[in-house]
Image: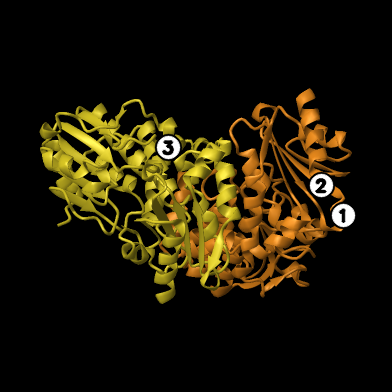
Chain colours: A orange, B yellow
Amino acid sequence: MSGTIAEAAALLRAHSRIAVACHEGPDGDALGSLVGCGRTLARNGWDVALWAPGDAALPDDYAWLGYDDLRRDPPGDIGERLLVALDCGSAERLGTMGTEVAAMAAATLNIDHHGDNTLFADVDVVDPQAACTTILVHRLLEALDLPIDLDTATALYVGIVTDTGRFMYANADADCHRVAAALLERGVEVDEVFRRLYEGRPAGRALLLGRALSRLELRLGGRLAATWLTIADLDETGAAEADSEGAIDHLRAIRGVEVAALVREPRSGGGAVQKCSLRSADPAIDVSRIAHAGGGGGHPMAAGFSLEGTAADAIALVERELGGA
Amino acid sequence: MSGTIAEAAALLRAHSRIAVACHEGPDGDALGSLVGCGRTLARNGWDVALWAPGDAALPDDYAWLGYDDLRRDPPGDIGERLLVALDCGSAERLGTMGTEVAAMAAATLNIDHHGDNTLFADVDVVDPQAACTTILVHRLLEALDLPIDLDTATALYVGIVTDTGRFMYANADADCHRVAAALLERGVEVDEVFRRLYEGRPAGRALLLGRALSRLELRLGGRLAATWLTIADLDETGAAEADSEGAIDHLRAIRGVEVAALVREPRSGGGAVQKCSLRSADPAIDVSRIAHAGGGGGHPMAAGFSLEGTAADAIALVERELGGA
C-alpha cells in the first residue's frame, strides 16, 4: 500500500536516528537523492548514516557531489535506525544484503518513482508520475519544512537533469520544470552543473569522433551507416579506447539509417582483430541476429561481434546480413 | 529607450495590420518566436504578414513548425503595417533591406533579448535577462490575454530548448523553467520535440562534423579550441550551411577550453568572407568583446564576427584578443 508524503514526514519526525540509502550501482538520481536528502536531515538534527550499497567504485561523473561521508556497508546499529531507501524499486536493490538489512531496521521508508516498486517498507511513497526521485525528496523536505541549501538544491537538480535526459525525455513534465525553477532560485549554477556532468572531455575524444565521422560510409541505400577506427587513430589523437564510445550514436541518428556499425581495433589485438559494435535505429531490426552471424551477441537494439581480419571484412559481414534480412 | 510589455501590447492593439519578422539566418528561437507570435495574432483577428527575411534556405531542423505561410520578402504594403521585429538586435538583422523596411513601416515594435540591441523601434522591449525571445513573446501574448494553443506552445518551447542548450546554459534560469512548465501544460510533447530537433539528421551533417573535429586546433595552451569549414566542405559532403551549427559545442566541451571558435565560409561570400562564431566556456570570459574587436557582436557567452580574409586570419584575431585579455 502506497503512503503519503505526510506519512513519510511523520515517520521521520518519530525517528531521530536514520540510515539513508540509495540503490546499488547508483546513477545521478540515486546519488542526488542520497546526498540531498541525507545531508539536509543531518544538518537539521537527525543522526544520519549515509549508505551507498555495494563494492564497485562510485561513478566519477558525480564525485563532485562529495563521496567522503558515504559508507559502502550498512551501519552496525541498523536495528536502532529508520532505513530510508531512495530510488530503490525493491529491497534487493539495496545490495546483496539488502533484504536482510531492511528486515533488521527499526522501521523502513521507501521513496521511489519506479512503477514496478515492490512496496517493501512500512511507509512506501511511490509516485511513477514523478520524473525522478529527487523530486519526491524535494516534496519530503518541503513537508518537513526544512531549508534547502545550495548544496542540496544542486544535488536534487542533478537528479532531474540526469533522469530526464536534460529535460528532453517524455517524463520531463510541468512539475519537473516547476521543481527545477524552485531549485534554481536557491542559486544552482546551471552551467557549472552542465560542465561537471557533460564537459571537460579530453581533446582526443573530439579528434577521434572527427576521424570516425569524416570516413563514415552509407551502404544499402542508406540503411547501414558504418565507420571504423584503428590503433593508429588512438595513437595519433592521444585518445583512450573508451573515447570512441559516443561515435556510434551519431551514425544511428542519421536520417534513414536502420543499423549503425562502428568497427574498432582493440589495442590487445595488435591490429589483426576487429570489434564491431552494432546499434539498431529501428525496433523492427534485431542487430543481435547480425551479431550472432559474426559469432557475437547482445540485445535487439545493441549488439556486437569480433573477427580476425580488416574493418572492411567486418562491414561486409554486416552489409551481407542486413541486406539479406 | 527600452519600453514595457504593456506598451508593446498597446501598440499591437492600435494596429490591426502587422508584419511579424525575425532575423536573417534564423535559429530555433527566431523561428519559434515568429511562428508562435505571428500565428497566434493571426488567429485572434490581426491581419498578419509573416516575414522570414533573406534568400538562403530556412534550416531544415525547424521545418516541422511549418514554413508555408512564411514570406521571404517584406510585404509591399509595409507602409500601412506595424513591423514587429523578433529576436533582432538591430534593424540590419532584418536582412539587406532591413533598415529601409523598418523606416517605411507605419510603426515599429522590437522584442528581443540581446544585450547589445540598438533600440531601433518606436517601442523596444529588450530584456537581456530573458533566456530567449520566445519567453518575451509568451509575456506579450499573456499581456494581450490571448489563448496559447498547442502549436504556439510548441513553437515557443522550441525557442527555449534551442537557446538554452536544452536547459543547460547559464541563461536557463528559474523564469525559463516556469515558462516551460506553463507551455508543457498546453500539451507540448517533449519527446516528439526532442526527436524532431536532435534526430533524423542528414548524413552530410555527420560528415561535416567529422571534418570540423578532425582538423580542430588547440591554441594558447588549450584555452582556445578553433576549427574551420569551407564551401568545398559543404560541396563535398552534400551538407547545408546550417548543418555546421552543432560543431562548436564539441569544441566548447573540451577540458580546459575557455573559448571555442568555428570559422565558416558563407556561400554568399564566395570564399573571400569568413564568419567566425564564438562560444565561451567560462563566465569570466566575455566573447562579445572578442567579437566586437572583429566588428561583430553578440552575448557574453555566444557571439560572432565576419571578416574578409582566410580562416587563419579569423582564428589569429581571436587568439590575439583572447591572449591579450
Q: Is residue A251 at all visible to an observer of this figure?
A: yes
Q: A105 and A279: which one is in front?
A: A279
The answer to whether one can see residue A131 in this image is: no
CB-based contact (under 8 Å), mark 1 and mark 2: yes
Per the image, the residue denoted by label 3 is: B59
Residue A161 drawn above or below residue B203:
below
Label 2, residues with CA under 10 Å away: few <14, some 14-19, many ≥20 = many
- Please tell me which residue is depicted at 17% across the width and 51% down the height of the picture: B120
Q: Which residue is mark 2?
A: A275
Disc nearer the start of the sequence (1/2): 1
Give residue A63's position: percent from left, percent from top: 64, 68
Chain to which mark 1 belongs = A
Badge 3 local density, few (<14 within 10 Å), some, or many (20+)? some
Local secondary structure at mark 2: strand
Q: Which residue: 21% across, 55% down? A: B118
Label 1: which residue? A269
Q: Percent from the top left, x then y, of residue B47?
A: 19, 27
